[in-house]
Image (spheres, coloured by chain):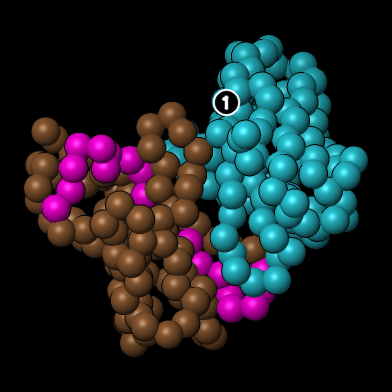
Chain colours: A cyan, B brown
Amino acid sequence: DTAVSQTPKYLVTQMGNDKSIKCEQNLGHDTMYWYKQDSKKFLKIMFSYNNKELIINETVPNRFSPKSPDKAHLNLHINSLELGDSAVYFCASSRQGGGTGELFFGEGSRLTVL
Amino acid sequence: AQSVSQHNHHVILSEAASLELGCNYSYGGTVNLFWYVQYPGQHLQLLLKYFSGDPLVKGIKGFEAEFIKSKFSFNLRKPSVQWSDTAEYFCAVNPSGAGSYQLTFGKGTKLSVIP
């Protein structure tokens, strides 16, 4: 069983469209994250949820909206897609964010905006 | 806020060569330190971590890293690399006790091992 799974793995879409990426973890973790990895492989945190509550909301455009229906799921919805949104989006989870820093990553969702 | 710098953008080695990847961080307090690896087309996975105690930590696949507090460094080493070590390596740091959501990654070092 995959510990952190994301769907879809690949997403190709036109500018202006709206798309969603789903993430599920079966590790029993309390904290989930979305990271963006750009073309230069730089990883930047976007959001973090702890027990369905938003903890971290970095400087991300309002077009990005995370939703956590329960602590095992964290979805990412993106409105009005732009060229600059093209990237690999990684979901991750960790135990209650109380300090180890060990993250468990999904396999990534490669978004290409044309 | 903490920051992480990885000095080498791309390292190319022949098989059996020794590896050392540099990582320096800036933060005024105690930290937890990590190395993550991302094999081509795959997700990031933890290679090794340092919380406290012995500054020389051993990870999976023969990797080790040494925390030198005075130099704010946490360099990754492997005595003899293999072709299968070809990957992107990320150093990461978070303040001790601060939580995983304050984990900051470096920009990564791409390692290419030539057979």
- Is B106 displayed left or right of B100 in the figure? left
Residue B8: horizontal and vertical position, in percent?
27, 54
| Residue beneath disc 1 | A110
**Which residue is located at x 37 percent, y 50 percent?**
B89
Residue B75 appears in the figure: yes
Magenta stretch encompasses residue A54: no
Q: Nearer the viewer, residue B67 or A46?
A: B67
B5 is higher (above) or lower (below) than B83: below
Task: Find the magenta span and give its range.
Answer: B80-99
Badge 1, how many Cα within 10 Å: few under 14, some, many 20+? many
Residue at mark 1: chain: A
A36 is higher (above) or lower (below) than B36: above
Quadrant the C terminus of chain A occupies: top right
Residue A82: horizontal and vertical position, in percent?
68, 25
Magenta stretch encompasses residue B87: yes
**Which residue is located at x 59 percent, y 54 percent?**
A103
Quadrant the N terminus of chain A occupies: top right
- Is B56 displayed left or right of A37 in the figure? left
Secondary-structure class at tag 1:
strand
| Residue type, numbered disc 1 | Arg
Residue A48 appears in the figure: no
